[in-house]
Amino acid sequence: MAPVDTLGIDTPVNETGQIISTVLTFSLALATIAYVVVLWRREGIVWPMFVVAAGTLTCLMEPAFDHLYGLWFREEGAWALYETFGSHQPVWVPAAYTFFYGGAAVVVARTLQRSPTMRTVWRLYFGIAAMAIAAEMAYVSILGVYEYQDSQPFVIAGYPVFLGFTNAMSALVAGMIASRLAPRLRGANLLALLTITPAAFAAGLFGTGILYLSVRHSVDDPSMVLVSLAALTVVGGIASTVRLLGKYVVVGEPLPAPAEAPPVARAAPAPAAAPERERAVV
């Protein structure tokens, strides 16, 4: 179960699926850009543009994910954009990131600004996860433009479904942070928003996924029982992170007060020395 190397087991890309993927993702990306332009003209806010740009920028981390998690974009007959980490990237990948990681993060931020509750956080999280799972199943099993190679845990329709929760975390956490910070930023400070989605992506896939990746790449053929158990730690770690940020960043619950240190017992004062008797003067 080593990482996909420079050349994976290649198969021809589905030509019709490639056309549909390209047209669909670029259409959704253009719709996302139109949406943030409308927000700027109607409400005078520019931070959604930076959040969308951050989502697009995150596509540069896709090859590292492919390399470690075993995703292989089919090369034969594919419209290539570039290759790195041994992963061939199709032309439609940046557009998909613009929509999913950029546009979804804006929607999350604006929704949480209107309804900053944990119920809203979980509703958004599971909604985005369901969308990610359905989309990836379609890309893998219907459109035939990529696949997950080697043994994978929890596979349905060619897709390891536990990864849908990691994808959801990236857009959700970026939106959660943006919901609190973005309205307060002005001028050059808005550039700081460009890092929130890549950071959330890395936290979900390489942070909460560190145990899974360590087990997956420990030997050539690790036990699928161990790999499956490790995959569950990814989902659990993400849920814990979402709950933590939801409670104390979105909802704004006060952090628990630090436990007071027990009082230090003071030593009893030493008894005063008895005064010496004055010597009798002879």
Image (spheres, rainbow, N blue to C red):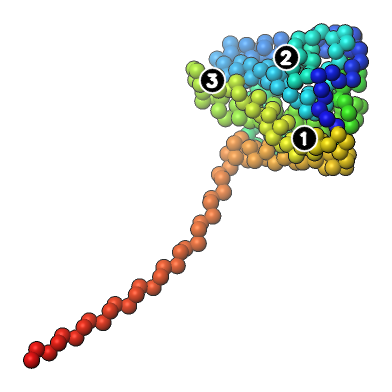
User: How far apart are the two marked residues, 2 and 1, measured between alpha carbons?
Assistant: 25 Å
Residue tagged by mark 2? Answer: 94
Quadrant location, the C terminus = bottom left
On residue 226, which mark appears?
Answer: none
Q: Residues within 10 Å of mark 2 (few under 14, many from 20)?
A: many
**Residue reaching furthest to the left:** 282
Residue 175, percent across and down?
A: 65, 27
User: How far apart are the two marked residues, 2 and 3, measured between alpha carbons?
Assistant: 22 Å
Q: Residues within 10 Å of mark 1 (few under 14, many from 20)?
A: many
Q: Is residue 220 left or right of residue 38?
A: right
- In the image, 116 versus 242, the foreground residue is 242
Relative to 193, is 213 above or below? below
Q: Residues within 10 Å of mark 3 (few under 14, many from 20)?
A: some
Which quarter of the figure has residue 77? top right
Relative to 59, is 27 above or below? above
- In the image, 266 versus 32, the foreground residue is 266
Residue tagged by mark 1? Answer: 213
Residue 132, percent across and down?
A: 79, 25
Please, what is the three-letter code of the amino acid marked with disc 1? Leu
- In the image, 105 versus 200, the foreground residue is 200
Which quarter of the figure has residue 142? top right
Q: What secondary structure is found at the residue carrying circle 3? A: helix
Give the residue drawn at x 67%, y 12%. 33
Residue 155 showing in the rendered view: no
Camera-side mark, 2 or 1: 1
Residue 6 showing in the rendered view: yes
Relative to 197, is 117 above or below? below
Residue tagged by mark 3? Answer: 190
Relative to 73, is 2 above or below? below
- In the image, 73 versus 47, the foreground residue is 73
